[in-house]
Image (spheres, coloured by chain):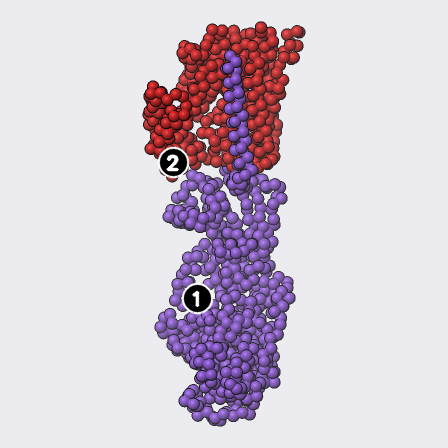
Chain colours: A purple, B red
Amino acid sequence: MKQLSSRQYVIAGLVVAICLTYIGRLFFIQIVDDKYKIMSVNNAIRRIVDYPPRGVIYDRTGKLLVANQAAYDLMVIPNQVKDCDTTELCRLINIDTKGFNDRFAKLKKQKHPWYQPAVFEGQLSGKAYAALQEKLYDFQGFYVQARTIRNYPKNVGAHLLGYVGEVSEKIVKDSSYYLMGDYIGLSGIEKSYEVPLRGIRGVRHVEKDVFNRERAAFADGRFDTLGIAGVDLTSSIDLDLQEYGEKLMRNKIGSIVAIEPATGEILALVSSPTYDPNLLVGHERSKNYVVLLRDTMKPLFNRALMASYPPGSTFKIANALVGQEIGVVTPDTRYSCNRGFSAGGVHVGCHAHASPVDLKFSITTSCNAYYCNVFRSIVEHYKPSEAGYRTWRDYIMSFGFGAKLPSDLPNELRGNVPSAEYYNKMYGKGRWKALSVISLGIGQGEMGVTPLQMANYTATLANRGWYILPHAIKKVGDKPIGVYNPKFGEKHYTKVQKKYFDVVVDAMANVMTNGTGRIAQIDSVVLGGKTGTAQNPHGKDHSIFICFGPVANPKIAIAVYVENAGFGATWAAPIASLMIEKYLKGKTKRPEMEKRMMEGVVLPVYENKTSATPVDE
Amino acid sequence: MREQRSIVQNIDWPLLVIYIALVTMGWLNIYAAVYDPENISLFDLDMQYGKQAMFIGICALVGTVILFTDGKLFPTFSFWIYAFMMVLLVATIFLGKEVKGSHSWLNIGGGFSLQPAELAKFSTCLALARYLGEINIKMDKLQTRLISAALILLPVIIILMQNETGLAIVYFSFVFVLYREGLPGGFLLLGFAVALLFILSLLVEKTILFAIIGAAAILVFMFFGKRRFSRLLRVAAVAGMAVAFTFSVNYIFTKVLKPHQSIRINALLGKIDESNRKIAEKGILYNVNQSKIAIGSGGLVGKGWTKGTQTKYDFVPEQDTDFIFCTVGEEWGFIGSSAVLLLFMTLILRIIYIAERQKAPFTRIYAYGVASILMFHLMVNVGMTLGLMPVIGIPLPFFSYGGSSLLGFTILLFILIRLDSYRMQIL
């Protein structure tokens, strides 16, 4: 008996062992392992993100450029998907079974945590949502997240306004704010003013039961935050002018940039070909994006900021200014031109005109020989000529060439004013001189300027010597842009004195009255302009025109590039003229010219060979 | 008067206090498990906690009656009670209504039904105590072993016929009673070895398993006992049987066990492949997962009473019955659930202590029966919610919702208290 009673310890020991094992297990899953807590939160607490509406964007007159519309994202929490009637769900959101499986495969590939929500099908329309909502309780693991997406009442300004898209994994990784599923401005104003536009997302935590029904606010809303709506922007764009410019540029490749000289505000920024910004919104967004991306005309490419062309003859004005400032040219300086410039085996041709010409007339008639001489004088004014070239380059860059301005728009190109080092490398140090790079005198050669830089240059001429960085936004909420970002209130002076500008502005007015820009003259407004033709190694030359007016008190400065359109006077000048008239007068009185411009088709003869391919240095 | 005072004096108060504590905590957890923030009323008879409150009332009454019954009646009528219960169990197969494929519930009117299998435990306990408590019974006789086995296996067979596998398995816990009464420890070890071999043969490659068996056999022969040729033969024979057994496991697993049973075992062993994952996730794996999530999310101190989101919003199936421990884990946290486990441990250890202080073998054997059953329920039920045991549908004593189970455990425990209270009157 004695022996048997000791067996109580075996049994009691077993009881103790079981209890201690279980307590150990409890310790592990309740205290050591966090996994279950996270899973529980995902199970029973739905985190509903309150996506505040993005700020809307008005034009300078208060018209809506960008509005919002409701959209619905179908979200999925993969590990909660059970007994899903795939066929029915696919029917409701209009995808096939393969698409259904692909979405999960994609999430798996992205190593998306299975207990976290992901967008299953984004931006469903109100109609699709209505049909889906009635059946939603049948699809466990799915829910709908309401949000706003963009809407463009006027279908204009696609490049300028930019588009919004879902954040990429990389953005999420690099940022402390963005989470998967957030939207972010990916280009244009949407990108550069992302922070004020987006507002701050809020979040609600709601307890839900096993049937996916929302039951009560979690912890009485203690962890909830209220979303803060995005700030509305007032753009400096004039909607009517922008729309008009896009119409004029239809079936042409190129761009128009118009700036209010006194403020640096961009009035219109047209890049052609353009696209309907509504295409990059909503359910069909990615499909449309691919179509646009594959278009050989590159409609997504913002030529106004990202295409670099030679400035052509418009650049002569800059050389005239630099020449005066350095003292190698005066208004009375005369050069003869006999169908061009010839020196040291270099020849630059010119059209037939009276000779010799003085400074003003050289601009009016756009004499090539004159500016070859001016450029040569500038460079050879210093010893060695490399030093002269460097000085010239410094002056030129003070006009905003050769570097990002920068404006408030993203992805601006720097353009190119070739450096002395570049030529040293090309010819060897000390083995090149003014004559080697003489085409810079007439704005050809390696010079690269974006239409935006060109418009800024025009504004600088209009202002007689200074510019304010171009910007497309006038007000952020109630804050004027100069307060929001002081750099857009600052004057940048060129290295050339005002008095020299007066001379060239006079000449630019003459261009309009009895020079190359006569076609662009408008009754009752004194304009200053300059034609240009950019040599294009790939095809027909690009037509360029810069213009501002009224000369006494400039309200608008404009630069127009039309690719493969030949002389500046043929296409770019009429377009610039119509734009200015439209802006200053509100309407245009030249229906034939308007019709000719709008209906004109100027497309390169051979596909895919536009010179507007980005030159990225 | 004298009789009554002696009951109050001799009652084992710790047992009673633990019992009351467990039942109260059980009720609180049932309340929390089915708690609906939009619909709060404490004693709604439509809700589980309302009914459970009523069951507790009935159990209090039954318990009191037992305490005031003459304790000598229990040994005297042991076999009669056992016989009556066996008849009732058999009758249930034919008269009982079908619930989830089993015929174990008797309709007793008023919308309530009784599960005799829960009550058969105490009667089997009594019968076993009565039989083994006889003066001339010795556990080393084959006859004794066979009769004891028969007493235990009879309800097992009937309950299996009712299709209540879980409740039938509970009866195997009586092997501890037999062990305490003299069954060689080898039987316990054998049971353990068989279970181990069963699991290993499901998990490990056959060749590796044979290597393990072989190595074990060589070790046993070399280091334990005398190295005689006859012993070598015996060890070899046992090893051979082990190998034969591993072959039968596959057969048992696929042919004898029902698919849902083999999935439960596979789920426990983490052997769910893609082909049966879907079925498994919907059913058993889902339960266990949700159960672990509920408990794991409780943390150190829990989410607070009725604040559990997993259980409250029905993520855990059978959260008020078999998976009630999830509610404890989620809402009371590590501290609360450990406390509950320790309370159960205290209860069982106390019963073992009480058993050992008896002069009458009958009471001792009965007490071991109670301890074994409680231990088994605790081990399987809590183990299953923690993902350490296969899902076997047996309740957590005193906690799980259900009148039959509560009544069964109440009777089991109160008979023990009654028997213990007159231990002094026995010479």
Q: Do discs 2 and 1 belong to a common subunit?
A: no
In the image, is residue A84 above or below residue B61?
below
Question: Above or below — where is B354 with respect to A256?
Answer: above
- Depth check: give the residue in front, B390 or B35: B390
Q: Is residue A320 above or below residue B115?
A: below
Task: For label 1, count other residues whose C-alpha is less than 10 Å away and answer few (under 14), some (14-19) or many (20+).
Answer: many
Q: Nearer the viewer, residue A506 or B198?
A: B198
Rendered position, A494 above or below B257: below
Quadrant in the picture for residue B299: top right
The count of marks equals 2
- Assess whether mark 1 and mark 2 are in contact (beta carbons under 8 angstroms): no
Give residue A509's position: percent from left, percent from top. Answer: 55, 84
Q: Which mark is residue A299?
A: 1
For mark 2, does the 10 Å Cα neighbourhood hold few (<14), some (14 to 19), or many (20 or more) residues? Answer: few
The answer to whether residue A550 is seen in the rendering is no
- In which quarter of the view is residue A571 placed? bottom left
Q: Residue at x 58, y 40 (%)?
A: A216
Question: How far is the residue under mark 2 from the one under mark 1?
Answer: 52 Å
- Return the x and y of residue A101 as percentages of the image width and height: 39, 47
What label sits on residue B276 in the rendered view? Answer: 2
The type of residue carrying mark 2 is: Asn
Circle 1 SS class = loop
Q: Is residue A119 visible?
A: yes
| Left or right of A239, for residue A533 | left
Question: Helix, strand, or loop for circle 2?
Answer: helix
Give the image location of residue A548, x and y in percent. 55, 78
User: On the rendered structure, is A296 left or right of A317?
Assistant: left
Q: Which mark is residue A68?
A: none
Q: Position of residue A559 (x, y in %)?
A: 51, 76
Seen at 49% across and 6% down, the residue is B135
